[in-house]
Amino acid sequence: MTTTATVAPEVTAWRNAVVVAYGASGLAFASWVSRLPAIRDGLDLTPGNIGMLLLCMTLGSFISVSASGLIVLRLGSKRTIRTGSIMVGCGLAIAGFGTSVLATPVAVAVGLAIIGLGTASWNTASNVEGAAVERAVGRHIMPRLHGAFSLGTVAGAGLGAWAAAASVPVLWHLAAAGAVVAVSVTTAAAWFRADVTPVAGDRTYAPDTFGDPSTGPIPVITPGAAQADRVPLDNKRKIAQAWRDRRTLLLGVMVLGLALAEGAAGDWVALALADGHGQTDAAGAAGYGLFVTFMTIGRFAGTLVLDRFGRVPVMRWCAALAVIGLGLFVFAPVPWLAFVALAIWGLGASLGFPVGMSAAADDPAKAAARVSVVSTIGYGAFLCGPPLLGLLAEHVGILHSLLAVMVMLVMSFLLSPVARKIP
């Protein structure tokens, strides 16, 4: 997917706006994850209690991601992303209030559930928007869009580590992060164009204006008019067909293992360093920051690596690196080696989601439905796996519970060929 045509200013603004949406999602996620040790200490929670708390977010997320295909097809990606970001901002504030003021797990659970409801559909819509802008730009930019998410997690983890070291109340930290997320995304969404960009072969859209650079700039279409002019073509049927597509389902399972490796790191690395390797809460947050830093490096390098070697070899190497890094983290005899393992683990987990989303969107006319299916399966692992690991940790400890992730990573390795680009 390469082109020598000059990218129109409208497309550049669109791409930059999508980058903001991905980055803000990472900032929101890392903000509350990096304060899990503080939430644990403030509410005096056991690993099992934390697992149940995370399950509340998982339930909200799974409900949302399961319906995300219909939501995006009905509302459009712009409205879905805007609504989701506002919900996430409110959920962060509620979780902080429940920790610092009410000091009750119930309030934190409500906040996390709202975060889950907002995040899942937002992320699916972002992948649809990202696939559309990738086609408009004419380059493989999906890894870099997910790299923007990782940059957001790096920023969020860094701020979280600073907040933990400076003993900043969880309420102040999460409320500020929530405000930044909601305002930045709702503002950036004004430049989103997936809902009004034509897709060849899909009668939902008007004739193509992106196929030939000589056709001139993108026509200006007001959001209200765009929604009114769209004619739904049995959205439920589109989703059902996507769920029956063999390649789409296998892509989802491939993404599942690498998504679980990423999600497990996000929810448990800080606590595993603190409880399993004897590190401080600040060092635990910094360790998660190291993980997402190397995941970010992997994603920004992903465009060049994918262009040179192709999806299948890259997916195999990613799964292998994730297994090596995770195993080394669990069995590291000294703390510094655990930090090295996090770097390897982060590189391995870096490209699972972006490659899976790009592969699901190979057919533009069916991209929204298929991306929603792969997102549902992948986010299901990303969200459901970590709470279940918490329950397992009650019996074998946090570190050894992470070994369960390796089984799914082996499956991702074996299913790598399904990521091959279809004509």
Image (spheres, grey):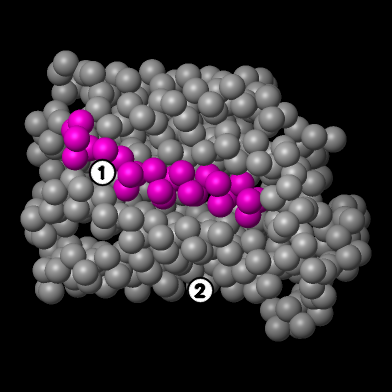
CA neighbours of label 2 inside 10 A, class few (<14), some (14 to 19), many (20+): some
Using the rendered view, name the quadrant where residue 205 is placed. Answer: bottom right
Q: What residue do we see at 58% from left, 64% from top?
A: 67
Which amino acid type is marked by label 2?
Thr
> Residue at (61%, 33%) from the top-left corner?
303
Q: Where is residue 73 in the image (x, y as percent from the top left)?
A: 69, 67
* Label 2 secondary element: helix
Residue assigned mark 2: 83
- Tag on residue 37? none
Residue 56 visible in the picture? yes
Task: Tell me which residue sits at (26%, 72%) in the image.
Answer: 94
The N terminus lies in quadrant? top right
In this rendered view, identify the residue nearer to me: 212 or 412: 412
Q: Distance between the residues labelled 1 and 2?
A: 32 Å
Indicate yes or no whether the magenta region holds residue 318.
no
Majority secondary structure in the magenta region:
helix
Q: Is residue 90 above or below residue 360?
A: below
Amino acid type of the residue tagged 1 in the rendering: Leu
Q: What stretch is highlighted in magenta?
A: 370-397
Which residue is denoted by mark 1 in the rendering? Answer: 391
- Left or right, 175 with reference to 300: left
**Outermost residue to the top:** 333
